[in-house]
Image (spheres, rainbow, N blue to C red):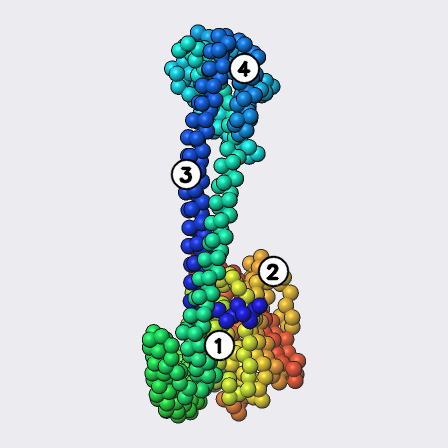
Amino acid sequence: MTGKIKRFNGVLVWVMVAGIVLVALTIAAVNLLDRLVIEQAAAQNLHAEFLRATGSVSRIIGKSGDIHDVDALQEAFQDIFELRPGIRRLSVYEIMPNSTRLLLSSDPEIAPDALSLHEQTEIAAGRSVAHFENDLIDRAWVITAPIRLNGQIVGALRGRYSVWKYDRLIKQEGQMAKDVGVAAVTITCLVFLLLIRLKVHQPIRQLLQAMRRAEAGDLTSQAPLAGPSDLQEVAGQFNRMLGRVREAIAVKEALLGEIQGFNDMLKTRVAETKEELHRANSMLVEARIQTERAEKLAALGELSAVMAHELGNPLNSISGHLQLLLKEADRKERYRHLTIIRSEIDRMVTIIQHILESTRLHVQSTSVDLNEVIRGVEALIAPSLSGKRIVFKMDLAAQLPSVAGDQRALHGMIFNLVTNAIQAMPDGGELAVKTLYAIDDRVEGTLVLRGDAALKKGAVRLILHDTGRGIPSDHLAKIFEPFFTTRHNRGGTGLGLAICHRVVSSIGGRMAVHSIVGQGTSFTVDLPVWNELHAGDPYHES
């Protein structure tokens, strides 16, 4: 059955559906028209017959001379029921000046005791009244007509006239229309099926076979030019389309070859350029590190020169007076020389204090996003890590509160810690940076800075861990001292961790270090959270 249904094409199905719909609409329209015509004729016929029955009742009453003659009325009922079997119920009402009264009924339990006001008005005017009862079991007209005696309206005959004969006729007409419609649809479908199979289906099947071959990749297939002119036009258009497709594929393959060659060349150049950029970036990072070291050494040299210059004169003066003091025997002269020596010593103390004051780290405390600072350092240092086999991992807490500090100083502090970690892994390794909000003041390792009391309320914690060589335990206490380094032969100055120590100390932070030789080193830094108190006191010194 499924195979037969599949053989119907779209045109046939739509034609059949359209034919069925049209026939169904025609049958419905014919049925409706027949029903209306038959019901209209039935109403007129039944009304006329009932008026004749009413006239017969009027004649019978006229013979007896009294509408109250029950025997005469029953005789009239019997004659009417015999002659008109469609009448189901008859009732006779007496018409009085202000009311009506039931005199006799073939079904007194159902018949009303009096006529309605509308019926009384129409009967009094000499007109009959009819209304239709659309009962599911037996549809009927209820007709009320006046009874006349000697030209006067003395009563009314009310009857229920069934339309069952007409309903049966309507049903027969409908069944006949359905049979004719089904026959017409069947014959029409068979004719269309035959014509479409001969003139349409076969050419379409050949065209579809050509399309399937083309879909499978056989672009050399051709559809036969058969069937109606429209199908021949479709087949010709399909053949021309395949020709253009074959031409387009040839052009496409040529372009793809050129694009592939260009893509390979571009990949090669991009790889070379990327490698050059990595090398340039590594050189820039190393240059920056060397520049910072040179700046630190230059500052140190300048500081040493200033100290040598400022302290040289007092020392020379002290040396001269000490020599004179050794040769002088006079007590007053010896006292004068000692006074001058003391004055020069005080001058040296003042000079040293002034130099220390000028070298203090002045930090302007502002609101700083620590995660953004770490990302900036990572973007700066990442390109140089690929050649060093070092994996940089970041685990930065979301919605981390801002810290109180100087962004430039914090950047330099993190950069120094990251640089030291990279230099501690010459054979590669893993560098992990993590941030979180910490309430507990306990940290792992050796505590280097305890931090301000404000850290007890909560702090932003930075943990930097590397898998490098580690720091011997006897060096842990010295790594934050200025100029202490174990990399003298590799350009180390010993100032990086000292600067980190001063930055953390200047903003009231906590710092700890934990290291195991051969396993790596972890630095933990707790920084104060930015709040209004820090906003009111933005400057710190160390």
Q: Earlier in the sequence, mark 3 or mark 4?
A: 3
Which residue: 48% across, 46% down? 174
Measured in 3D between alpha carbons, the distance from the residue under mark 3 to the one under mark 4, in whole angstroms, is 35 Å
The residue type indicated by label 2 comes to: Ile
Amino acid carrying mark 3 in the image: Val
State the residue position of label 1: 378
Q: Which mark is residue 393?
A: none
In what element is the residue under mark 3? helix
Above or below for 123 versus 448: above
**What residue would you read off at disc 3?**
37
**Left or right of residue 200: residue 463:** right
In what element is the residue under mark 2? loop
Question: From what the image shows, is residue 97 above or below residue 345?
Answer: above
Frontmost residue, 512 versus 311: 512
Q: Amino acid at mark 1?
A: Glu
Residue linked to disc 4: 73
